[in-house]
Amino acid sequence: MKFGGTSVGTGTNIRHVADLVTSYAKKDVKVTVVVSALAGVTNSLIETACQAKKSDAQSIEGFTKGLLQKHQEAIAAAIKSKAIQKEVTEITEKTISELEKVLTGICYVGELTPKSKDYVLSFGERLSAPIVWGAIKDSKVETACFTGKEVGIVTDNNFGEANPLMNFTTHLIRERLSPMLEKGVIPVVTGFIAANQDGIVTTVGRGGSDYTATILGVALKADEVWIWTDVDGIMTTDPKIVPAAKMIPQLSYQEAAEMAIFGAKAMHPRALGPVNKENIPVRIRNTAHPENNGTLITKEPQAEAKEAVKAVAMIKDVAMLNVYGAAMVGAPGSYAKVFDVLGKNGINVMMISAAASEANISMIIKRGLLGRAVSNLEIALSEKGGIISEITTEDDVAVIAVMGANMKGTLGVASKIFQIVAKKGINIRMIAQGSSELNISFVVKEKDGVAVVKAIHEEFNLDKA
Ligand code: ASP
Ligand code: MG
């Protein structure tokens, strides 16, 4: 069971999480718990770490004081036993004083490397897990607390987006947790953080506690991995856009992965990899409504759904980048050159479309990276003899992604989507459909995005699913 940042956002919520976990343990279910940092803490750590480069001791102290207070309040509300409160408070104080030293170090050196950034980020989960552990212990159930490193999640050196070495990791996790689970002890593990082979702290990417949960689920051959969050499951669209949005009861790994990438529940994009391979079902559930079954993600959803379209999402804060050049036509390797420049400058391309004329490529990237993309392409490829003759941009666009496994081979879905958009008098700037046919993505002006999502949700009857 993985509990996200809002599920453990306050002491009262943590108390509720402990009650949920122990209620299953009392029914003889063997549970391993994975926890995220308290809501907002990881973001505040990133901000402070980045500022620490040019910060002073005083502002660092101000930050750690606030952090200590936040966690102390959570301890007071989550744990009743004074003895356990004291035990967890001591761990918290020790951890925060270590964090203060790390931040001060960064402040003196004036540099934040990916390695030291991961170290700073690890403190969010290192602070939340002991409180959850204390709250479970408070309920007189045997429990033990681990960091991702202690439990045996070993990764490569790709700081910030590390990948687990699955064979080694599986071996270590089984060795450390299986005997405990047999004895009815509940392990509480920090999500998101792990260590490389030298024992240096790594993180598996933002939102990575989902990934920790599926790694543990696979290693322990779990019956199911439950992702407890603050929504009822994966929805047909963002309920803030369409209040009538519905929860989707069943999805395949492939569909869920598409939706994760497009932020329907914003699951970690690599989290489904391990469970998909081992065929372990994942369930998305609402901590506030445990009576609901949530969305079940499996290889082959049992209820054979007929609808072609299952969900629609809008991705904001993106920009379109168009690259033109007659020299690209019929020249092998010219696209590779463009993507190489972007890749080397840390710019992820989210969507591509290129016409058969080969004279231009359109790409979607994060809006904040637009300036860097244009300047680097210009330096590398538009100088004399370069393959690019012109670069244009639009920074007021949004991607609309329409998803569903049964779109594959269903005729007329694309035509219906584009008719809906045309009927609204909205212009489409770019289109892409991969050959998996699971997803049709297109680009409109951001101001039109909400209207498009609403119209598609309604015309495909997603609210009646
Ligand atoms: N705390 C980490 C983050 O905010 C990991 C997680 O929440 O899953 O990205
Ligand atoms: Mg989080």
Image (cartoon, rainbow, N blue to C red):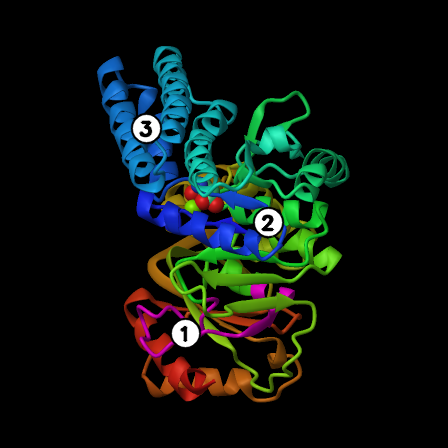
The answer to whether residue 96 is above or below residue 141 is above
> Label 1: which residue?
428
Q: Is residue 259 left or right of residue 457?
A: right
For the stretch drawn in magenta, the main secondary structure is loop
Residues at circles 3 and 1 in contact by the CB criterion of under 8 Å: no
Can you tell which of label 3 and label 1 is closer to the viewer? 3
Report how far apart the C-alphas of labels 3 and 2 lie in the structure: 35 Å
Q: Say which amino acid is labelled 3.
A: Thr
Q: In this figure, which residue is indicated by the disc labeled 2?
A: 31
Q: Quadrant of ligand 1?
A: top left
- Name the disc covering residue 48, or none: 3
N-terminal label among 3 and 1: 3
Does label 3 or label 2 sit earlier along the sequence? 2
The location of residue 275, given as percent across then percent down, is 68, 55
| Residue 41 vertical placement versus 416 (above, below) | above
Relative horizontal placement of residue 54, taking residue 463 as reference (left or right): left
Magenta region: 233-256
